[in-house]
Image (cartoon, rainbow, N blue to C red):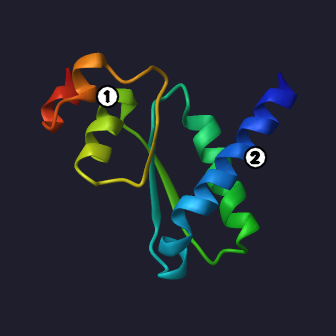
């Protein structure tokens, strides 16, 4: 289990670095939202990323639940959403942020 979590964290860090480097260069905080289930992993990844970047970037992790995080992501309120379930089928094609809260 530890090997799986370590590999997952390495993948999350690599993805975060690749996707968010422009934000880091502009000193923008990276905003992450997570379900309560995934929060510990997201928090660890954010802490490790900040340590790796020697404090040159900031990352905050909030808990809004899977649906709440998807809604924030849809509204461009966060940079990364960590979910504990797949995206609902009806939400994949919807342009309305209201679909995430149900």
Left or right: residue 80 versus residue 74 is right
Left or right: residue 50 versus residue 34 is right
From what the image shows, is residue 3 above or below residue 51? Answer: above
**Where's the C terminus, which quadrant?**
top left
Find the residue positioned furthest to the bottom: 26
Residue at 65% from the left image edge and 46% from the top image edge: 12
User: Helix or strand or loop: what does disc 2 sit on?
Assistant: helix
Sequence-wise, the earlier of marks 1 and 2 is 2
Q: In which quarter of the image is residue 38?
A: top right
Q: Residue 101 carries which label?
A: none
**Where's the N terminus, which quadrant?**
top right
Find the residue positioned furthest to the right: 3
Residue at 17% from the left image edge and 38% from the top image edge: 97
Q: What is the x, y in percent for residue 34?
A: 46, 37
Residue at 49% from the left image edge and 57% from the top image edge: 60
Q: Which mark is residue 67?
A: 1
Q: What is the x, y in percent for residue 22?
A: 50, 74
From what the image shows, is residue 87 above or below residue 55? Answer: above
User: Helix or strand or loop: what does disc 1 sit on?
Assistant: helix
Q: What is the x, y in percent for residue 56?
A: 63, 78
Q: Tell me the residue that label 2 is attached to.
A: 10
Q: What is the x, y in percent for residue 33?
A: 43, 44
């Amino acid at each position: 289990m530890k090997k799986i979590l370590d590999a997952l964290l390495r993948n999350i860090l690599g993805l975060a670095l690749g996707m968010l480097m422009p934000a880091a260069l502009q000193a923008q905080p990276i905003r992450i939202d997570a379900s309560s289930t995934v929060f510990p992993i997201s928090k660890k990844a954010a802490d490790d990323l900040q340590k790796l970047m020697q404090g040159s970037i900031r990352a905050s992790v909030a808990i809004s639940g899977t649906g709440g995080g998807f809604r924030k992501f849809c509204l461009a309120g966060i940079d990364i959403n960590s979910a504990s379930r797949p995206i609902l089928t009806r939400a994949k094609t919807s342009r309305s942020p209201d679909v995430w809260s149900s």
